[in-house]
Image: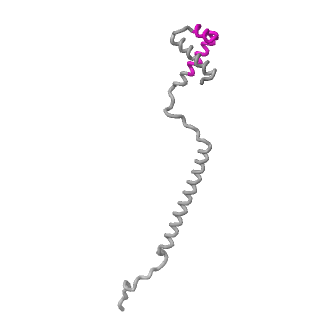
């Protein structure tokens, strides 16, 4: 159910539209609203400015809304967990690299024995 203020606003808007449509004069509109003609023109100006502001070209879609406190808290926690995951993945990668280097034969700085079959003796 509309409040008293809403009913008054609707009545004012209706009178302003009637005057703008030349159905009644500004003087008649002011009399209907029980105000002076000067006050009527002030209300008309404010109403038309508000109407223009309401229908101006705006960015398409909804306005971006600020995330709720709970959403902000969850986003912060996600960031923390992603950082922990990245650290864990890097640790696992380094651990695998270390394990791989331990199991490889040492090539640099060591002599490997050749199998007996491949070694040929020089005749004297």
Quadrant in the picture for residue 83? bottom right
Q: Is residue 48 left or right of residue 111?
A: right
Q: Residue at x 61, y 16 (%)?
A: 43
Q: Is residue 48 magenta?
A: yes
Q: How is the image coloured?
A: one colour
Q: Nearer the viewer, residue 107 or 22?
A: 22
Residue that extends furthest to the left in the rendered view of this protein: 123
**How many marks on residues?**
0
Measuring 64% from the left and 10% from the top, which residue is drawn there? 36
Q: Is residue 111 above or below residue 37?
A: below
Quadrant position of residue 70: top right
Q: Position of residue 88 (x, y in %)?
A: 55, 60
Q: As drawn, which residue projects farthest toward the bottom?
A: 124
Q: Quadrant of the C terminus?
A: bottom left
List x then y, in percent, for residue 39: 63, 13
Q: Residue at x 53, y 66 (%)?
A: 95
Residue 115 percent across, percent down from the top left: 40, 83
Question: Compared to 22, does 111 lie above or below?
Answer: below
Q: Is residue 44 above or below residue 99?
A: above
Principal secondary structure, stretch drawn in magenta: helix
Which stretch did the figure color magenta?
A: 26-50
Asked if residue 39 lies in the magenta stretch, the reply is yes
The residue nearer to you, when weighing 108 against 89, is 89
Q: Position of residue 15 (x, y in %)?
A: 56, 13
- Looking at the rendered image, the quarter that the N terminus falls into is top right
């Amino acid at each position: 159910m509309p409040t008293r203020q809403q009913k008054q606003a609707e009545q004012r808007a209706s009178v302003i539209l009637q005057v703008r449509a030349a159905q009644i004069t500004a003087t008649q509109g002011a009399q209907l609203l029980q105000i002076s003609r000067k006050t009527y023109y002030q209300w008309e100006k404010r109403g038309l400015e508000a109407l223009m502001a309401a229908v101006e070209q705006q960015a398409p879609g909804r306005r971006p809304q600020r995330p709720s406190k709970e959403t902000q808290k969850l986003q912060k926690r996600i960031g923390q967990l992603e950082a922990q995951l990245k650290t864990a993945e890097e640790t696992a990668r380094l651990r695998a690299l270390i394990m791989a280097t331990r199991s490889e034969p040492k090539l640099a700085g060591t002599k490997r024995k050749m199998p007996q079959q491949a070694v040929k003796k020089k005749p004297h």
